[in-house]
Amino acid sequence: MPPVGRPRVFDMEAVLEAAMLLFWEQGYEATSLAQLRETTGLSSASLYGAFGSKEGLFEKAVEHYIGGPGSVTDVVAGEAESPREAVARLLHGSIDMQTDTSHPRGCLIALSGTVRAPGAGEAGARKVVSARRAADRARIRECVVRGIASGELAEGTDVDGFTSMIHGFLLGVSTQVCDGASARHLHAAADAVLANWDARGR
């Protein structure tokens, strides 16, 4: 009879939380396997056995982030609120999350992708975060389309241009937060973005 495999003895949620915070603080490229082993408490064998690679752990850490702090963007996924209210909650809620001092500042999705010429792992990591950015952009676009249909925005509104304004601001919050911009100033900036929505109303 073949030996029964030994069960994992680590806490998956704790490992993903620790990896998420490290990737969030340092980005994918700057985070080494040695640092990941130290912060998660996993041996190389356990890390590779559970996740396959650094890229595999990063992907799971991003999923963990999306289900936690990153879920703040999910407000634009449904139709329970008016499009304008959903976008307002998206922007202000994201600012609150990104300036929260209980975790690294900024947004993991916006900050953790690599910028140098990619190897296989870097390319995979970039795809993980770019897919989430694309999903957020698509949901913002749906809000803009709903805004036009409901009369909150004029029929002639440039859907893609308006979407880029909102999404570009959302992504730019991370850089400003890391450069020391205050939550108060960022909330004021979000209100200025929303003023463009109000000005486009019928």
Image: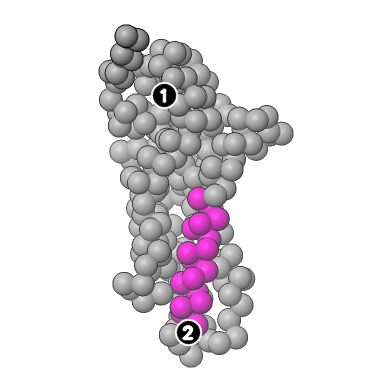
Residue hosting label 1:
50
Q: Is residue 90 above or below residue 96?
A: below
Q: Residues within 10 Å of mark 1 (few under 14, many from 20)?
A: some
Residue 176 appears in the picture as rendered:
no
Q: Position of residue 184 (x, y in %)?
A: 38, 57
Which residue in the rendered view is the most extreme toward the right? 117
Q: Nearer the viewer, residue 69 or 197?
A: 69
Range of residues picked out in magenta: 132-148
Element type at mark 1: helix
Q: Position of residue 145 (x, y in %)?
A: 51, 77
Element type at mark 2: helix
Residue type, label 2: Ala
Residue type, label 1: Ala
* Residue 41 in which image quadrant: top left
Magenta-highlighted stretch: main secondary structure? helix
Q: Quadrant location of the N terminus?
A: top left
Q: Residue at x 57, y 48 (%)?
A: 130
Q: Is residue 7 magenta?
A: no
Which of marks 2 and 1 precedes in the sequence?
A: 1
Please indicate whether residue 61 sits to the left or right of residue 179 in the image. Answer: left
Please indicate whether residue 26 sits to the left or right of residue 8 in the image. Answer: right
Residue hosting label 2:
149
Distance CA(mark 1)–CA(mark 2):
47 Å
